[in-house]
Amino acid sequence: MDKNVSAKKSLKVVDPQESGVQNGQSDDYGPITPVADKPSRGEAEAAVRTLIKWAGDDPSREGLLDTPARVVRSYEEFFNGYAACPKTILMRTFEETDGYDEIVLLRDIRFESHCEHHMAPIIGKVHIAYLPHRRVVGISKLARLVEIYAKRLQIQEKMTAQIANTLNEVLEPKGVAIVIEAAHQCMTTRGIHKPGVTMVTSRMLGAFRDDPSTRREFLAMVGNPGPSAAPFA
Ligand SMILES: [Zn+2]
């Protein structure tokens, strides 16, 4: 277990590196090429009608008539991260920083994602920090980076690594630190039914990995992750 995150008792701490997510292993940093056999909107709506029947209801009753169309439109929103390129949005950087070389931290970026195992919501927040090396990036771009990876089918470990690796590759800073805290509805509303459990993952690169004082400074700035501070309990 990684000691990067000081976790409360209820927190499960996972280091993405121990979870088999390796640097650069994934090829999905860029936009995912559209699947060749992408179904039509009509086919997608028919699939929702099938699931309604599977649940035990009648898709032709009045209250459910427009539901398949609404679900398909929701999917366009939930999964719009496939159409965006995370690297491109970080390309525009600023070099006039007057020598600023301290930690840049964007804290408590709320995100909504879906787990790739159950397609159930994952709701949480991301803390992104980097140590600039000549260049900085607009802060809204960091939030957008989170958004692109969140709006895909995910596991938290992979999302943590993807955000860190992309920032590291494009910005080439002296270090990157990512902490994600999230609640997984596949665990709270089904299966083992454990509400209130938060999963915490972290990825430290460069100075945040090699220099304990830099890492300590980051963790102090983020604060102790836990349910009290969580906007999503
Ligand atoms: Zn799940």
Image (cartoon, rainbow, N blue to C red):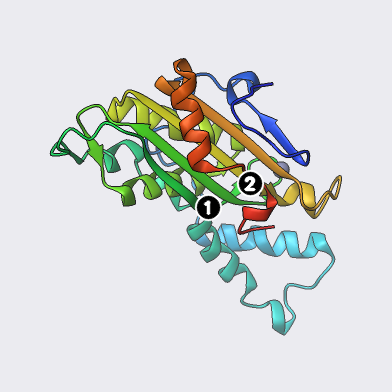
Q: Provide residue 160's location: percent of width, then percent of height.
A: 53, 34
Left or right: residue 3 versus residue 105 is right
Q: Provide residue 159's location: percent of width, then percent of height.
A: 53, 36
Question: Which is nearer the N-term, disc 1 or disc 2?
Answer: 1
Specify whether tag 1 is near ligand 1 (CB below 8 Å): no
Q: Nearer the viewer, residue 56 or 147?
A: 147
Question: Which quarter of the rendered picture does the N terminus lie within?
Answer: top right
* Mark 1 touches mark 2? (CB < 8 Å): yes
Q: Toward which corner of the image does residue 163 lie, by quadrant?
A: top left
Left or right: residue 185 versus residue 192 is left
Q: Quadrant of ligand 1?
A: top right
Badge 2 amino acid: Ala
In the picture shown, does residue 226 fall above or below 169?
below
Residue matched to label 2:
182
Residue matched to label 1:
111
Q: Nearer the viewer, residue 62 or 192?
A: 192
Q: Provide residue 62's location: percent of width, then percent of height.
A: 71, 84
In the picture shown, does residue 22 fall above or below 142?
above
The kind of secondary structure element at disc 2 is strand
The kind of secondary structure element at disc 1 is strand
Task: Give the Cα separation between the discs numbered 1 and 2.
Answer: 9 Å
Question: Which quarter of the rendered picture does the C terminus lie within?
Answer: bottom right
